[in-house]
Image: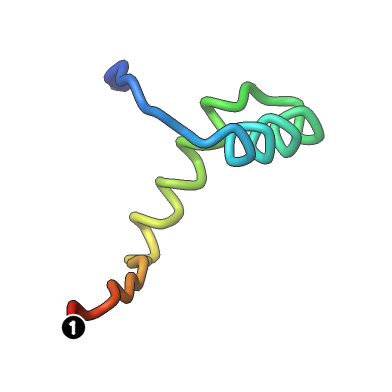
């Protein structure tokens, strides 16, 4: 079951996924969900290096 959410995405990120979704012939929300599900299944974690305060 899917839960509706509201997200704020950068325009370039949204256009990237919309373009990929159009090529694949699926809605962009479904493509984003598939991408995030793949991250979950493969235990991908984003590495963020925050600048150190001086």
* Residue 12 figure quarter: top right
Q: How many marks?
A: 1
The residue lying furthest to the right in this view is 23
Q: Position of residue 22 (x, y in %)?
A: 77, 28
30 relative to 17 in the view: left or right: left
Residue located at (34% from left, 55% from top): 40
Residue sitting at the far left: 54
Q: Position of residue 43 (x, y in %)?
A: 32, 66
Residue 25 or residue 19, whichever sits in front: 19
Name the image quarter holding the N terminus. top left
Q: Residue furthest front?
A: 54
Q: Quadrant of residue 18?
A: top right
Q: Is residue 17 above or below residue 3?
A: below
Give the quarter of the figure containing the C terminus: bottom left
40 vs 15: above or below:
below
Within 10 Å of disc 1 (Cα), the crowding (few <14, some 14-19, many 20+) is few
Q: Secondary structure at mark 1?
A: loop
The front one of 36 and 1 is 36
Question: Which x, y percent locates residue 20?
Answer: 73, 39
Residue located at (36% from left, 27% from top): 7
Identify the residue at image location x=22%, y=80%. Answer: 52
Residue 31 rendering spot, x and y as whole percentages = 57, 35
- Label 1 belongs to which residue? 54
- Colour scheme shown: rainbow
């Amino acid at each position: 079951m899917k839960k509706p959410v509201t997200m704020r995405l950068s325009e370039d990120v949204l256009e990237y996924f919309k373009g990929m979704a159009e090529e694949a012939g699926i809605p962009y929300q479904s493509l984003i969900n598939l991408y995030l599900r793949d991250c979950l299944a493969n235990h991908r974690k984003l590495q963020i290096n925050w600048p150190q305060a001086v």
